[in-house]
Structure formats: structure tokens, C-alpha cells
Image: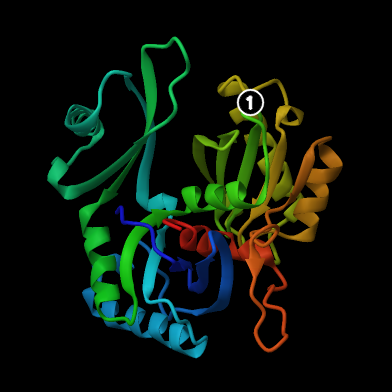
Amino acid sequence: MAFAATNGMVGISIRDTALRMAEVTNVAGESRISRLSQGRVRTALNFTSLQDHTLIRRYAEDINRLYETADFQISSGVFILDSSMVVIKKIPVDVNLQGDRLKDHMRWEVEQCMINPLEQYILDFAPLPADDGKDFMQVVTVVARRLVVDYLKEIFQNTDLQLRAIDVDVFAAQRVFIGNYEASADDYVALVDVRRNGFQFSVMKGATFYLSHEMDYPDDEQMEPPHRDDEHAARLISKELRRIIIDYKLGKSVEDMRAIYLYGDGVTDQILETLQNTHNVRIDRANPFKKIKIASQSGDPLVPPHPETFVIPVGAALKGL
């Protein structure tokens, strides 16, 4: 969903039952975080719960409760959709395709790889900058089930927030990187969402999306923290990063990355330290508050104890600002 720029936005994310919100305002051309809050929804948001329309009002009540308790002032919101609920593809197309011709072509491309009729999906896409001298460009394409989007719209029709856009966690995280860190046009940077049940990898080339990849824990490793072996989790991250780098010809080892940033609820000191001790490359927690200023209230700092858990809602709020 696209929308015009505004002077303030609330980013909302639900991961399992964790509900987080970040309010970002635009002051004199500078984005500032004015409020942060976290709570819970009573039912995890996933494909199973999306089949139950009796839960719509319950989700709306949980969102409203957190919104009102934290005294949010902005009424426009961006909701983050988990990447497991969408299809993200990079499709090469003729560089001369523009406007309606490009839109029609992308619809045709998506139709070739979807089982159900195209009317059951919502398609969005964004062309990436074309390399000089090449006659094709890459287009990042996102496909979501229409029933998922309609369900989310119904939730927000019952809240105090106006749903202005639906974003995807991968792009929200990359938006946070762009707002807080720097990388040259030829640098590859990896972002790793450490989840309870797996990992979401994405790679940027400079400030541009390059790829995304999701990895679940093997069936025999579905252990809840703190019982999960964090050293083993770090080894899985290393192994998968190495595979991605080699398969996509980004280099020969993890050390060929410019930097690696971890975020999400599953980041632990042990995972971070194991990766740092294994690879000679900058590896750190992603900090959405590194450069984006946080407005203090009553002199109390707003920075939460685990900033990496707020990457997604902050990235959502930055959309359109």
C-alpha cells in the first residue's frame, strides 16, 4: 500500500504475541522518535489466526490498549507483515518497460508462479537502479494474499489508528539501516532477524535491497529459549551466511561482508559473542536509535534495554517520512 508523505507515523509490529509500537515525527526535515511502547496480543498473529474472524476485534482491542496507554499522538499507522506471509522475488525486466506496460508485465510474471488466480493476491513492486550499459533492470516484487490484507484492514477499522500502509519486516529493517548506518555503493551488508523458530536473512548492496532469505530451524531443533543452544544457533547463522555469499557470488567467506547486524527477539549475548569470535568482520546488534534522535519525556530516556527488538516498528514508522 502506497501513500503520500506525512509529518508523523506509528509503526506497529506483531511477532508471535509480542506487540510493539514506535511513533516517529518529522521535525524540520528530521525524523525523531517521540514514543515507544511494547505489550502483548492475546493470540499470535499467523495464517491460522487469520482464518478466524472472531479474533479481529480482540486484536483491535489489544492494539488500542497499548496505543492509549502509551499516549500516542499520531493517528496514522503502518503495520508490518511478517515476511513468511508474503512472497518476495527479484525479477529481471527490460529497462525500457515503464508505467502501465511495466505494471502489466509484472502482473504477468507473478501469474506464472502463483497457483491460485491473480485476483486472490495483492502485488507491489519497485524497480531497482539499472546498471549502466545494461538493457535490463531488477524489479523487487512482493505478493501478499488479499485475504491477509483485508483481515488487517478490518482490524484497524476497529482501532483509533488509520492504516496508511502495510509493509514487510525485511524492508522495515533495511530502512532502519539506511537511517542509522553508512555503507558505500559496492559494500554488502547482511541483516539477520534472529527469531524463536528460525532466521530471516537480508542483504543490501549499499543502500539498495539485494536479496532476502528465510531459514527455519530443523524439525528436531524446535526448542524454546533458554533451552536452545545459542552456540549452535550462531553456527547455523554462520553456515547459512556462507552459503548465501557463495551461492550469490558475493565473495568467498563471511569476511567479505562489510558488516553484519542482528536484530529481533532471539538475539542473545552468546549468539553475538560466538559470531564475533568466529569471524573477522563487524558483527553487532542493530540499533535503530543510533542516529535517529529520541525525544525525552519528563527527562526520562526512552531507549529500551534491547534496542534491536524495536528495529521493525521503527522501520515501519519511517515509511513515508
Q: Is residue 219 visible?
A: no
How many numbered marks appear?
1
The x, y position of residue 215, in whole percent, is 53, 44
Residues 31 and 193: in front is: 31
- Drawn side of residue 131 relative to residue 151, left or right: right
Q: Residue at x 20, y 38 (%)?
A: 115
Q: Is residue 181 above or below residue 248?
A: below
Q: Residues within 10 Å of mark 1 (few under 14, many from 20)?
A: few
Question: Which quadrant holds residue 224?
Answer: bottom right
Q: Amino acid at mark 1?
A: Asp
Helix, strand or loop at mark 1? loop
**Image quarter (top left, top right, bottom left or bottom right) of the N terminus:** bottom left
Residues 167 and 97: in front is: 97
Q: Is residue 110 above or below residue 85?
A: above
Residue most toward the front? 28
The x, y position of residue 119, in whole percent, is 13, 46
Q: How is the image coloured?
A: rainbow
